[in-house]
Image (tube, rainbow, N blue to C red):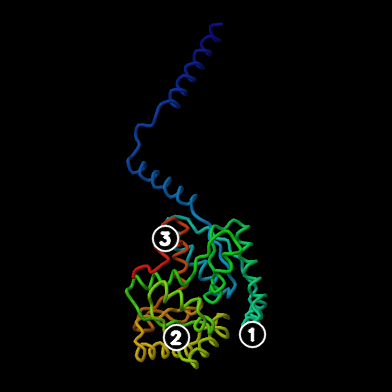
Amino acid sequence: MRFGLKALLVVLFMVIAISGCIACPAVDVKKDDVRSQALLDKVTSEELQMKTIGIIGGISWVSSMEYYRLMNEMVENELGGLHSAKILMYSIEFGEFSKQERLAQQGDWEPLRKTMIDAAQRLERGGADFIVIASSTMNSTADLIETNVKIPVLHIADATGRKVNERGIKIVALLGTTYTMEANFYRDRLEKKYGLKVIIPNKAERDYINTVIFDELCAGKLTEESKEQFVRIIDRLVKEDGVQGVILGCTETPLLIKQKDVNVPVFDTTAIHAEAAVRYSLNKENPFAESNLDGAGR
């Protein structure tokens, strides 16, 4: 009995000691640890509130790859650590889509429009909070898409117009596909909403730029000859038309032309569009607010 009582007392003593250690609060908590935890909680909260970016890609996959890379790098730079963007991408098969583009040039827009609406609806069903069309030319369908989905489309011309206004520039050259340069969807938006004077190259230059975009850039081909010709066109527009900046209005052209290549500000619309999407995704800015859409920076 004596041995049993001693053993019981030892066990009770150990239980009390362990319970005391568990209940005893830590007294040596460093202030840096508290601050680090607060920062971690803040970043985690921001990540949970991050909007999901829906990208209509594949037009071409070359520029879609740039969008994906840029968006993830921007989120990582903003939040740090292993953070990345929340992205859904529907990549259109460009071989078939290029046939639909040719039909559209001949006046039959129905197949192309169906493809774009279908892509947007897939992203909406997948849980995207808003849509980015990773093609300057196909932003011409932005208004049509918005009538067929319940989420907004972040127009590339709006993102670009705000950025040009921030630089205080009034006369810009627009380089892109023939359709982007000649149609109203991009130029009118820049002129009417952002007070810009938009200059486009002459007919021969437009044809050359369009050929390079489809035959080279969309296939991932970058040549020194094409770069030299693009620079020559830009230099002429600066000298003869008083252009103060150049908008690379095709999402593949920033792969060919860099700021170091010309003497006027270059507006990389792929990076500008990606940045606007990320800032909205992280709740840093609302590009759909009325004050951001109409005449910003005038």
Q: Residue at x 64, y 75 (%)?
A: 112
Q: Nearer the viewer, residue 217 or 246?
A: 246
Q: Position of residue 219 (x, y in %)?
A: 58, 81
For the C terminus, the quadrant is: bottom left
Residues marked 2 and 1 touching at CB (< 8 Å) = no
Label annotation for residue 232: none
Quarter-of-image position of residue 241:
bottom left
The secondary structure type at the circle numbered 3 is helix
User: Which amino acid, by three-letter code, is at mark 2?
Assistant: Ile
Precedes in sequence: disc 2 or disc 1: 1
Label annotation for residue 200: 2
Marks 3 and 1 sit apart, C-alpha to C-alpha, by 45 Å
Q: Which residue is mark 1?
A: 106
Q: Residues within 10 Å of mark 3 (few under 14, many from 20)?
A: few
Marks 2 and 3 sit apart, C-alpha to C-alpha, by 35 Å
Q: Which residue is mark 3?
A: 77
Residues marked 2 and 3 touching at CB (< 8 Å) = no
